[in-house]
Amino acid sequence: MTIRALLRFELATMARGRTLTAVAAGFALASLVVALAGLSAGGVVTVQGFARTSLSLLQLVVWTVPMLALLTGAVAGADTHDVEFLVALPVSRPRLLVARWLAHVVALGGALLAGLGVAGLLLAALAGTGDAARYLALVGVAALLLAATLALGLWIGVAARNRLRAVAGAALAWLLLVIGADLIAITLLAVLPAGQAGWGLSLLLLADPVDSARALGIALFQATTIAGPTEAALRRVLGGAGVWLLAAGLVAWTIAPLALAARRFARSDL
Amino acid sequence: MIALRGLTKRYGDRVALAPLDLDVRAGEVVALVGPNGAGKSTTLRILAGIIHPSGGSAEVGGRDAVRDGVAARRRVGYLSQKLGVPQATVLGDLADLVAAARGVATQMAEDALTATGLGDRLGATLAELSGGQRQRALLALATLGEVDTLLLDEPGISLDAEGAEDVRAAIRAARARGAAVLFASHDLYDVALLADRLVVLVDARVVARGTLAELAAAAGVRWNGEPVEPPVERIYRVLVERGRGPGVLRMVQGDAA
């Protein structure tokens, strides 16, 4: 069976639920609030105001996308233990799992795009389309982060085997990725000598998909004026190939958990 | 068609299936009977690729059901005791998926559902169907295409008399086209009616196997070789048939009180 048939099946089931509409509406609302706040913070509607808003939206994305994706992925992963009829069809379990991941990426990515799209249109209308590439970079970073954290959530769900444990695991993972990594970074900065902290921070950036996405966003925005010393520090730490390294890290954060989830699912008894 | 050799399943120290040898030939119907936890479902679930055996081998249609599971399942129809599909699934979407998996046109799957009286429910979710309708739908989809091995785990569960007859008809049809049928059931009337051979499992191991006549002789029970429908089921069937006919069914005395 082709993965297309599985994808069509998964998408059809997802599309009939209300979750996607709620996600799209939520992102649109949140993005609009951030966009308007960003524009007004600039004092006047200028290109600089648009840049500031993109950075604010990036902050929204790196907090909310992992939460949504981890929870959704974990539930979807846990539910794979309740699909006996589908598993008994002539289709490999890894293929079933990849189709499920892909369907979630497409569906949630679409909802995210719709939400950010509304805010993007407003920004374009008020601030012009001069910095559209910067906004597209934001969407790209959001998509990479969504794919990675969905894969991670799916792995957590497959390993947890039931929804309750899966959701608890996903919530813990979100806390570790969003807050825990920052605490470790602060500790590293305090403990390590100034010259050696750079390497530790670089590794930490790659070890945490949320921080990778944040750094990638800032680097892609080339927001020297807005991000100021943060961007300068990032450039120093990551060097010239930093952007590619971060993007590759996010891809690895997608492939590795997905492979682990597929392996676990293939070996487990339903 | 089905060949099991020393098939075993353990969960830690607990033995769910002691080494089992069993062959089911093409065009043969074999019933697994026994109390709950005897290993009936475990056997079927290993063959369907739902759980992995701890030892032994399982072949379906000449293919290793464990190492070459996808190929082995190409011509296997399996009906589980559980629903096994998300409740929010729309019946038509499931028909589309099963058709793709079996390599047949979606229309064929929809026709199979229509034949079971579910043609007007293709847009309904499984949650919106009754338990019996769900079971009939899944049975119709499980037997779709060129299935030459049929694995049924309590197929008559939650079905009314007509649904139970549909299951019997599906098993008979599968046998007639040369499929190997292995089914587990607590409904001993169905077992007597349909099975060519019985395998009796108790506490995860086989305690007896053979035709019903052989088992009756082994158990020292005199029997004329004809399956007998339990009286209460016959009474119920007759009343339902009469109730569907013209006129009002005469109520028995005292019922109006």
Image: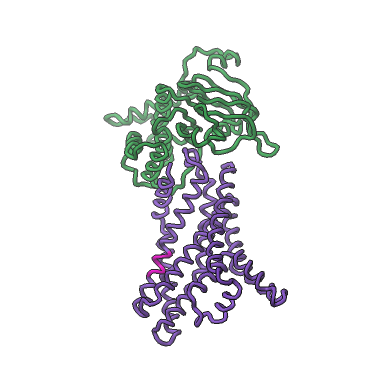
Chain colours: A purple, B green
Quadrant of the drawing holding the C terminus of chain B: top left
Indicate whether residue A85 is drawn in magenta: no
Q: Is residue A195 visible?
A: yes
Q: How many marks?
A: 0
Magenta-tinted stretch: A112-117
Instruction: Residue at 59% x, 77% y: name it.
Output: A233
Up-down: is B225 above or below A45?
above
Instruction: Residue at 49% x, 27% y: name it.
Output: B61
Of all residues shown, which one is farthest toward the front?
A240
Figure quadrant of residue B131: top left
Residue B16 place in picture, x, y as percent = 64, 34
Q: Horizontally, is A120 left or right of B54 in the view?
A: left
Camera-nearest residue between B145 and A206: A206
Residue A149 place in picture, x, y as percent = 53, 60
Up-down: is A121 above or below B112?
below
Residue B209 place in picture, x, y as percent = 58, 20
Figure quadrant of residue B246: top left
Instruction: Residue at 56% x, 51% y: name it.
Output: A259
Secondary structure mainly formed by the magenta segment: helix
Figure quadrant of residue B256: top left
Of all residues shown, which one is farthest toward the bottom?
A43
Up-down: is A181 above or below B11?
below
Q: Is residue B193 visible?
A: no
Residue B1 place in picture, x, y as percent = 50, 24
Up-down: is A250 above or below A102?
below
Indicate whether residue A116 is drawn in magenta: yes
